[in-house]
Image (cartoon, rainbow, N blue to C red):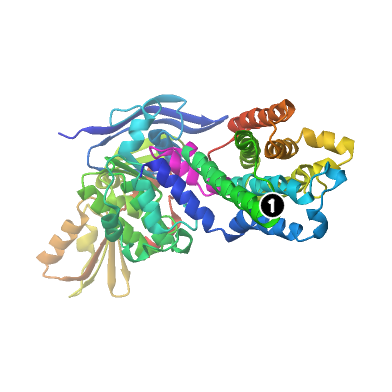
Amino acid sequence: MSKQIIEVSALHKRYGKQVAVEDVSFTVDQGEIFGIVGPNGAGKTTTVECIEGLRKPDGGFVRVLGLDPERDGAELRQRVGAQLQESELPDKLKVWEALDLYASFYPRPAEWGRLLESLGLADKRNTRFGKLSGGQKQRLSIALALVGNPEVAILDELTTGLDPHARRETWDLIEGIRERGVTVVLVTHFMEEAERLCDRIAVVDSGRVIAIDTPAGLVSRVQSEQRIRFHVSAPLDESLLTALPEVRQLSRNGSQIVVTGTGNLVNAVITVLARHEIVAGDLRVEQASLDDAFVALTGRDLDRTIMSTRSA
Amino acid sequence: MNGFAKLTWNETKLLWREPPTVFFSLVFPSILLVALGSIPGFREPSQVIGGLRAIDVYVPILIAFAMTMLAFQALPTSLAVYREKGILRRMAVTPVGPTRVLQAQMLTSLLMALGAIAALVIAGRVAFAVPLPKQLFAFALAIVLCSAALFAIGLTIAALAPSGRAANAIGTLLFFPMMFFAGLWIPRAAMPANLREISDYMPLGAGVQALQDATAGAWPHPLQLVVLAAYIVVFGIIASKVFRWQ
């Protein structure tokens, strides 16, 4: 049913003696949002640059829409839209001029006026690039990646440097792109972004793919504990809960009870409480996140700032 | 409009949004010509420069000034900034490609240079009765060769400069000796023999002499054509070997 749009197999790329990509293989299906996630320097950008035809691989096999980026670059560039990391426009170029210019490069361009509107840039039409905010520049670069009506959009670190509000807006936008049937490859080091947007994720570390799965699939690989917190409506005999095989530990935090354990913890605890006619109030479940999965897979934190805001 | 035409049009608009560049390459040479022409001595024939009037020899010198301004300052700075900001890399993932940006910028600079040349020739003719070029085809050839040589050097500057700022500094540094040998301070005919001999082998020395000969109705000396062609080939090769798109 699903058609493979991108195929990367045993990709290898080095810069001088330094290996940027050791061995990367994955496929991307039509219409999905495929995430490439990993720490800085993992080889994510080099991998997508080989897909875009910006770099020549030293080994392996890359096909995009059945095309070889090296040999069929001209056709590839008509059908693939790219947003590059740290790529700008001339400061004095106006927003509409940039879109009009890039539209003229493609055989069947999108109607850029509508694109401008859907990206919330309609009132910035006549603003020069240098006068745009970081979020507006980022949205314009997404617009430029889409103005050629591409079948595949490759977006590299598209929300880096954006404030949380702009980041969330950008995420809505990417979901909108998928709805148009465009296949999206998203490079990111924000786990929250990958978790929210991607159908499947390739976790890349030190130039190798260490896992490919859905966000939920990656999380479930982690034998991480769950933690539930609640208040009880009546006095509770702690041994009722600690006797459960799922429960590893129980502690009290003031009037709040904190239970950690594994397996179907929530169900087990609630069932016992219900049997004793105790209601668990303010029940909160803290589950393993993609961050935890990443730490488990690579042995290190991907993004400490995200970690700390999430666990707070 | 197709991609390249639109690219050139956009680059033209961007060039017009840099008032200092427009002023120094398009307007300033003509102002300088009028200022020099207002000195009575410049309107008298002089034996030092072979019986010509100083104002006559300054038209080709100021044409060289305008072309050098564009080729050594505007073009390399803009290209180095484009590389610095990832604009050339971004163009490399479009069907048009980064080479087109380079071509569009050269075309834009050439059109601006032609505007400056027309302004100088007309101002010279109207204000000081400087004769129009008698050998038009040779004049056009001299302009094409001279601007190609200057662009080749300008592209080499853009290729070697690590940043836009550096490109601007290198261009400025080279501008003055180039203009010296073009005769901006001492016209070639008034130079001591050894200086003039060096000037013969400089791109602007050869270029200015070729323009002057064409104005007088003569075909450029083969030496000048060979010198200009050599600069085009040598710097064209260097630029194409060292130029980095990112």
Left or right, residue A202 beside residue B166: left
Asked if residue B91 lies in the magenta stretch, the reply is yes
Three-letter amino acid code of the residue under disc 1: Ala
Disc 1: which residue? B129
| Image spot of residue B162 (x, y percent) | 63, 44
Rendering quarter of residue B22: bottom right
| Range of residues picked out in magenta | B78-99
Of B90 and A165, nearer the camera is B90
Give the camera-side residue of A170 and B169.
Answer: B169
Q: Is residue A49 above or below residue A198?
A: above
The one nearer the camera, A62 or A237, is A62
Horizontally, is B181 left or right of A140 in the view?
right
Q: Residue at x 43, y 37 (%)?
A: A49
Q: Chain of mark 1?
A: B
In reply to whether residue A141 is colored magenta, the answer given is no
**Picture quarter with the N terminus of chain B:** top left
Mainly helix, strand or loop, the magenta region? helix
Residue A124 in percent (x, y) is at 37, 64
Residue B21, image x, y percentages:
60, 55
Q: Which residue is rendered at x = 32% and y = 41% of the image?
A: A106
> Which is nearer the eye, B131 or A17?
B131
- Lateral position of residue A191 relative to residue B24, left or right: left
* Residue at image coords 66%, 49%: B166
Q: Residues within 10 Å of mark 1 (few under 14, many from 20)?
A: some
Seen at 50% across and 46% down, the residue is: B86
Left or right of A179, for residue A141: right
Q: Is residue A256 visible in the rendered structure shown here?
A: yes
SS of the residue under disc 1: loop
- Residue A266, x across and y down, in percent: 20, 58
Residue A90: tell me if it is visible: no
